[in-house]
Image (cartoon, helix red, strand yellow):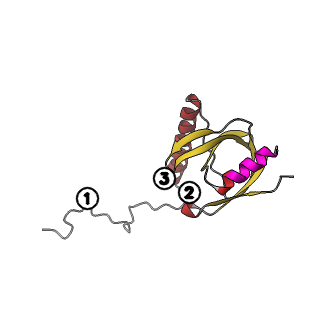
Amino acid sequence: MSSKAGAVSGKTPSSPSVKESNGNDEWDQYLVGEIQRVKAERNERLIENGMLPFLKLPEGETEVHFFKELPRDVKGTYGIRKGFHVRVNGQDYLFAINSNSPVYAKILEKLQKGETTIKIVRAGTGQMTRYSVIGRPK
């Protein structure tokens, strides 16, 4: 029995014939293009079904314009959330937020006062992501 029993090929990641990613190769270009294609197709399907693409806030401060439309219930990975029709940088989105969140309550308070453009700050990533609402934009 060979010492390479069960191996698919004799090449290892350290073999010179295995191409490593350096940030400028075909692999990285393929991944970037494929991710953009998948996102575009998902957004097209959402729009065809009468929905908007979901808003994923970038880290930092974002000015979000809320339309005066009743939020709809959105079922997803994290349970049922309230989905608001919003606009960021000229693009319309669905902003889904947990109705038990303190940020949800702050957004409702600002909307009740007539403020439809609200600054939201996103900090952290993954499970450590936190959102906060700040004062009236200038």
* Secondary structure beneath label 1: loop
Q: Residue at x 56, y 44 (%)?
A: 36
Q: Which residue is mark 1?
A: 8
Q: What amino acid does circle 2 point to?
A: Asn
Residue 106 painted magenta: yes
Residue extending farthest to the bottom is 3
| Depth check, front residue: 96 or 18 | 96
Q: Position of residue 61 (x, y in %)?
A: 74, 57
Point out the stretch of residues depicted in magenta.
105-113
CA gap, disc 1 to disc 2? 28 Å
Q: CA distance from mark 1 to mark 3?
A: 22 Å
Q: Which residue is mark 2?
A: 24
Quarter-wise, where is residue 91 in the image? top right
Spatial separation of the CA atoms under disc 2 and disc 3 = 8 Å
Amino acid type of disc 3? Trp
Q: Which mark is residue 135?
A: none
Q: Which quadrant holds the N terminus?
A: bottom left
For the point 72% across and 50% down, which residue is it? 107
Residue farthest toward the right in the current orientation of the protein = 138
Of residues 80 and 5, which is closer to you in this image?
Answer: 80
Is 137 on the left or on the right of 7, as rendered?
Answer: right
Q: Which residue is mark 3?
A: 27
Pick the front one: 130 or 68: 68
Q: How many marks on residues?
A: 3
